[in-house]
Image (cartoon, helix red, strand yellow):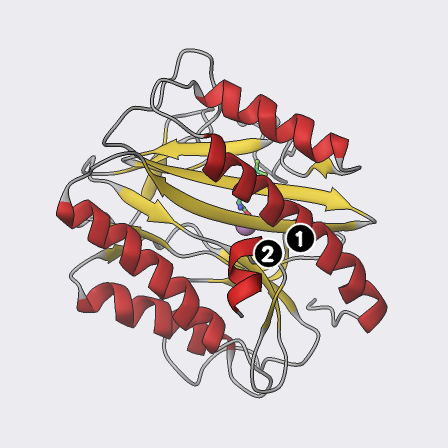
């Protein structure tokens, strides 16, 4: 069931969304080659709690998969060929030349915010930089379709079309989602699909739109049994950006803009 959020609920979601963005802004300043992914996670959790939030991902357990243990961290930190759900570890070091996708969820005031960005560490391969830029553009193009009266897969088709026009592949077995008092609500928001199909979007729907795009040919992110991290099948790099948005007439309201983006908007 897709819920429509009231303006009162949306005001609360603005606050959890803003804190989510602040975490990613803080990490963008702090991340450096040589740090462990666990250090990033600790900084994020402390920041969230200092701001009276709770990490949404910590202890999250997907329904109906007994093989997977509850998620043990505040962040997902996924490096290079890792698509999503990289579990922070004190043995995993981020290095110059890596792309590092950081996904963060914050629960505050009864509602979740969810956002992700792929950070680039130092100088990287030109093609990989293009992957990161295009994935970011895919998110913007998807958000531009999240308006009242459009259909759900208008978002999906916009993401897919842009990625494919560069020869990149869309990860099809991981999707965005509705969001609100639960981290994952209806509807699933795939990153591929046909225009003018899917449910009609209504003002007040809250969506986490999250393109995961890879170099190479992998269309799936695969995990080992019982493990969280999901990687491309061919080992090629993958990028991930995510915003939490509210469907509005004419233009979506983005709840997880970085403070930098807010000031130029
Ligand atoms: N943004 C991702 C999602 O919405 C992160 C979930 S991580 C988990 O699926 F630990 F909560 F599963
Ligand atoms: Co999400």
**SS class of the residue under badge 1?**
helix
Residue extending furthest toward the front: 263
Residue extending furthest toward the top: 91
**SS class of the residue under badge 2?**
loop
Say above or below: 251 vs 241.
below
N-terminal of the pair, mark 1 or mark 2, is 1
In what quadrant of the picture does the N terminus appear?
Answer: bottom right
Q: Specify the label residue 18 is tagged with.
A: 1
Is disc 2 surrounded by few (<14), some (14 to 19) or many (20+) residues within 10 Å?
Answer: many
Tell me the residue at 47%/78% (across/down).
Answer: 145
Residue 38 in view of the camera: yes
In what quadrant of the picture does the C terminus appear?
Answer: bottom right
Side of 77 where 204 appears, left or right: right
Instruction: Please state the horizontal and vertical placement of residue 163, each as a whole percent of the image.
Output: 26, 63
Please say if the residues under marks 1 and 2 sit with CB atoms less than 8 Å apart: yes
Which residue was labeled with disc 2? 256
Residue 72 in view of the camera: no
Instruction: Please state the horizontal and vertical placement of residue 221, each as a whole percent of the image.
Output: 34, 42
Instruction: Please state the horizontal and vertical placement of residue 193, each as a whole percent of the image.
Output: 37, 71
Side of 219 where 146 appears, left or right: right
Cα–Cα span, label 1 and label 2: 5 Å
Tell me the residue at 60%/30% (across/down).
Answer: 44
Judging depth in this view, the residue of 17 and 215 nearest the camera is 17
Tell me the residue at 68%/43% (across/down).
Answer: 106
Judging depth in this view, the residue of 257 and 158 nearest the camera is 257
Tell me the residue at 67%/53% (across/down).
Answer: 18
Q: Quadrant of ligand 1?
A: top right
Side of 48 where 27 appears, left or right: left
Side of 107 where 249 appears, left or right: left
Query: Where, by quadrant of the figure, is residue 23 drawn?
Result: top right
Is disc 1 surrounded by few (<14), some (14 to 19) or many (20+) residues within 10 Å?
Answer: many
């Amino acid at each position: 069931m897709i819920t429509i959020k009231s303006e009162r609920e949306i005001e609360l979601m603005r606050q959890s969304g803003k804190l989510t963005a602040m975490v990613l802004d803080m990490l963008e300043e702090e991340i450096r080659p040589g740090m462990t992914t666990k250090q990033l996670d600790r900084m994020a959790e402390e920041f969230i709690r200092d701001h009276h939030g709770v990490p949404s991902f910590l202890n999250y357990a997907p329904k109906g998969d007994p093989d997977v243990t509850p998620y043990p961290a505040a962040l997902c930190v996924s490096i290079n060929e890792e698509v999503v759900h990289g579990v922070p570890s004190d043995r995993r070091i981020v290095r110059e030349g890596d792309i590092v996708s950081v996904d963060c969820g914050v629960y505050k005031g009864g509602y979740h915010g969810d956002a992700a960005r792929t950070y680039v560490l130092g100088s990287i391969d030109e093609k990989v930089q293009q992957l990161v830029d295009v994935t970011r553009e895919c998110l913007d193009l998807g958000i531009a379709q999240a308006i009242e009266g459009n259909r759900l897969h208008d978002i999906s088709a916009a993401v897919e079309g842009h990625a494919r026009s560069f020869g990149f592949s869309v990860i099809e077995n991981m999707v965005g989602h509705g969001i609100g008092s639960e981290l994952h609500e209806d509807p699933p928001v795939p990153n591929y699909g046909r225009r003018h199909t899917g449910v009609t979007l209504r003002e007040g729907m809250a969506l986490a739109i999250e393109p995961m795009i890879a170099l190479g040919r992998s269309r799936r992110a695969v995990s080992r049994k019982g493990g969280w991290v999901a990687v491309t099948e061919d080992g090629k790099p993958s990028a991930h950006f995510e915003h939490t948005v509210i469907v509005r007439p004419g233009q979506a309201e983005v709840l997880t803009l970085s403070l930098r983006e807010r000031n130029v908007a």
